[in-house]
Amino acid sequence: MAQYPPSMASEIPLDVLEVIFRGLTPYDLAICCRVNKQVHALAFEALYRDLRPNHRNSRSFILLESVDMYLGSIAEALLKLSRLHTLILRIGHMSSWILPKEKLSFSLHTFSSEFYFDNALISFLQSQKELKHLSASVSPSPGVPMVIQPHLFPGLVSLVSSMSVVEMIAPGRPLRYVTAYHTYGETPSISCLAQSTSPLGVRQLAINFTYLQTIGCEQVAQAAPKLVTLTIDADAVKPDDYEMVNELTDWIEEYLSYAKDLSCLVIVFHPMVTSIFNASVRLSMSSFYFIVLEQSMFVNGCPGQDWYIVND
């Protein structure tokens, strides 16, 4: 195996690196975070040590890594971004307290977080009336009453969340793109999608098979009759479990008999079968993604012919 020389940064004493990093721009510090573990620790600390937005006209604020030591600085920074349109905070579940509580100076179009649906998050969302894209990946906290007023974010077009949240938010809003999941507890009704005020209703839907198993194919078709793209997360299906594989394929085959407008079907497997797709008249391509292998497979079909695998 070839041996590569160590990077120059990894040969510099850490105390010297600390001094150097004080003078680097955030862009350069982000690059240094990728060198190795030792350099990453120093560069990461320097990157968030003095978090002050130098452009009050910033339109986006995105954090994709846990930054517990700097949450106070982040909270202060958010108060200064008066023209913010996109806020993405994928920094864990317990930090919704950093969201501005009063004197909000911005109106978001896009918000995404991993925060629990607690009172702080609900209060913040209720202040964002121009929101169009919402991703809130964690279900409401047990015992916390969730109330989303009907007049809030009336222009919402895309939603990523649990089905229990979708059920509360979908009615009366022009949703076209929905990504949802449900794994346990009382089964939310998918009929809420039919209450979208978008002229053609929900057009793209991503949902997990565990949830689909609890509802009928006809219910999905009635909730989104003009659906064009369906993504099924085969979360509980194992390749060697033939009973589950058959259940999945049977569900899809029955659903395709209802889905007259569907043109794209995506099945996501976690750790095959092509004849089922013949039930759809308009379906022309299916995509399979194998998460463990990090590989995908595309299957094409032509009217009157067998389906065939297309290489990436």
Image (tube, rainbow, N blue to C red):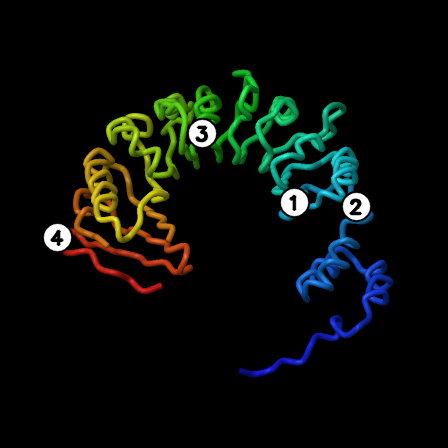
Instruction: Choose the circle earlier in sequence order: 4 or 2.
Output: 2
Question: How far, Cα to Cα, is label 1 from label 2?
Answer: 13 Å
Q: What residue is pinned by disc 4?
A: 304
Q: Quick check: 31 above or below 126?
A: below
Q: Which amino acid does label 2 sit on?
A: Leu
Residue in the foreground of this view, choosing between 139 and 170: 139
Question: How far, Cα to Cα, is label 3 from label 1?
Answer: 24 Å
Q: Which amino acid does label 1 sit on?
A: Ile
Question: How far, Cα to Cα, is label 4 from label 2?
Answer: 61 Å
Within the image, what quadrant is residue 122 found in?
A: top right
Instruction: Choose the circle earlier in sequence order: 1 or 2.
Output: 2
In the rendered structure, find residue 175 and report the number of the disc placed on it: 3
Within the image, what quadrant is residue 235 found in?
A: top left
Question: How far, Cα to Cα, is label 2 from label 3?
Answer: 35 Å
Question: How far, Cα to Cα, is label 4 from label 1?
Answer: 48 Å
Locate residue 55, reporting x and y percent: 78, 44
User: Pointers 3 and 1 in contact (CB under 8 A)?
Assistant: no
Q: How crowded is mark 2: few (under 14 residues within 10 Å), some or many (20 or more)?
A: some
